[in-house]
Amino acid sequence: MLRTSCQHHTLHFSCQHLLLFHHSRLELDMCLLTQLEFTPCLLLLWVVQMWFQSGFLWTLAEKPTKQLKIEEIPVVRDYPDVFPDELPGMPPKREVEFRIDLIPGTRPVSIAPYRLSRPFQEELRRQLDDLLSKKLIRHSVSPWRAPVLFTKKKDGSWRMCVDYRGLNAVTIKNKYPLPRIDELFDRLKGARVFSKIDLQSGYNQIPVREEDIEKTAFATMYGHYEFRVMSFGLTNALRCFMETMNNMLHKFDQFVVVFIDDILIFSKKEKENVKHLMMVLQTLRDNKFYAKLKKCEFWLSEVSFLGHVINKKGISVDPSKVSAVVEWERPSNVKEVRSFLGVRSFLGMAGYYRRFVKEFSIIAKPLSMLTHKNVKFEWTNECDLSFRVLKEKLVSAPVLALPEPGKRFTIYSDASRVGLGCVLMQEGKVIAYASRQLRKHEENYPTHDLELAAVVFALKLWRHYLYGEPCDIFTDHKSLKYIFTQKDLNLGQRRWLELIKDYDLNIQYTPGKANVVADALSRKAMPQH
């Protein structure tokens, strides 16, 4: 269904596969619609796409579909053992075992358990019983001790995590190289059919070296335990996992790329992809690695991977990366023009990158005039053109660049009482913009927690770029500089710190005036769909 909204009209076109919709305050160009031809072949796309045409924002979204059962999926149904509902238990001995090598002279680190509310106590008991039944943990008498906390998964459930900051601080860092994203993309050029496999609790499928198990010990109100498999929060877990995946799948380099627990199979033809998929599934079976069916996708003509959209035409930036800029609505009155939600804020953000936009001052002049005192609000055709052209310039090369592995990343983050905003940069070039509105429970957060939430938002969103890469985070909240050494943290802050510590970060203070882009995005945050 195509729904096109303007000030007075709404039109609908339908297709059994997809829902299409459009909303704009601009007047609808009826002639434009009559020239478009919509067919099921054109509309049957696999992922969200957005494009900006003739001043209109068109959004194409995949209609939710019923989750297929494994017996309904060709090829995949021949490998039911690769897609169990749950991990069957301890993994076999791997070519690469997870090891924890300590800095010479290190003594065991012992930290008392955190207090948990009653609901979390019950959840802890349930998860401990599950891990014990699968023999992934065991009772411990280790001198090492770390506390437990919980982090929320995307599906709303809770993941038990161990705060290994004490252990990580005395662990020798693994230097195994992570893949270069640009090299991964080079291998994907020319591919037309894609299948994606997501491993089930991938870390838990790699055993810990026997002599290192005692170092993973954690304390709870129910007893002292230690992990026999790799756990979230351990400093070298990511690189060990990547080494394991590469050792297992390197023979398929011509049609497989791996990043963390995502396995992407790419081919030029569907028949080839079927054959390639069978080879990968057989390898997973032989090595007793297990995948999660509901997170896997097969035989796609277009796929989102590492922040980019890949199809037969090539590789392009994922539109969701710049939706915060593209969806910025034109102001409707003087108050909006001069507020942080209007032109003044938009120009402040755009002006930060004026060196990337040819003739910036000329393009922006009609909008700049609106911000002057004693100027009557009148949104002219010149203002509209200036607004649209600047948005197009901001989300196109050379402003948005591909990241270069090995070079330091920079994140500017900010929070307001409206939302969270951040921008990812590298050597002064923008990689992506992002913002979102505050959720209901976040509206009562103190400023410190909001600023920390903005940092976490950025890290989660761009983790595929930032894992294993050095990154400077600039915030206008001074106390965040000391987050790694603060002792009196609440449960929410501890959860966020559990995520933050997996990154190679340097948090720095920058005055609000210097953080203009993130500030603008946070005050003009986009709703989460």
Image: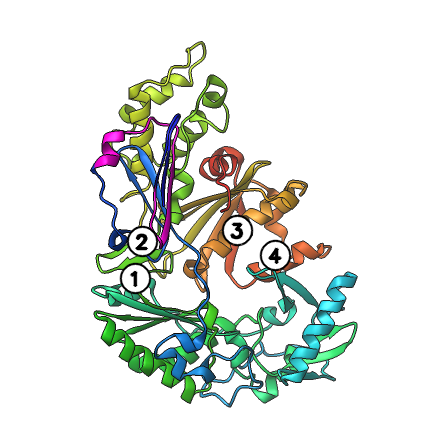
Real-space Cα distance between discs 3 and 2? 20 Å
Residue type at the position of mark 2: Leu
| Residues rendered magenta in the picture | 13-34
Q: Position of residue 444 (x, y in %)?
A: 68, 41
Q: Which residue is mark 1?
A: 182
Front residue of 252/87: it is: 87
- Element type where label 4 sits in the image: helix
Q: Earlier in the sequence, mark 3 or mark 2?
A: 2
Crowd class of label 1 (few under 14; some 14 to 19; many from 20; radius 10 Å): few
Q: Residue at x 54, y 77 (%)?
A: 85
Real-space Cα distance between discs 3 and 1? 24 Å
- Element type where label 3 sits in the image: helix
Residue type at the position of mark 4: Trp
Q: Earlier in the sequence, mark 3 or mark 1?
A: 1
Q: Position of residue 516 (x, y in %)?
A: 46, 35
Real-space Cα distance between discs 2 and 1? 8 Å
Mark sitting on residue 457: 3
Real-space Cα distance between discs 1 and 4? 29 Å
User: Mark 2–mark 1 contact, CB under 8 Å?
Assistant: yes
Crowd class of label 2 (few under 14; some 14 to 19; many from 20; radius 10 Å): some
Q: Which residue is mark 4?
A: 496
Q: Is residue 404 visible?
A: yes
- Element type where label 2 sits in the image: loop
* Quadrant for the N terminus in the image: top left
Mark sitting on residue 402: 2
Front residue of 375/55: it is: 55
Q: Residue at x 46, y 19 (%)?
A: 333
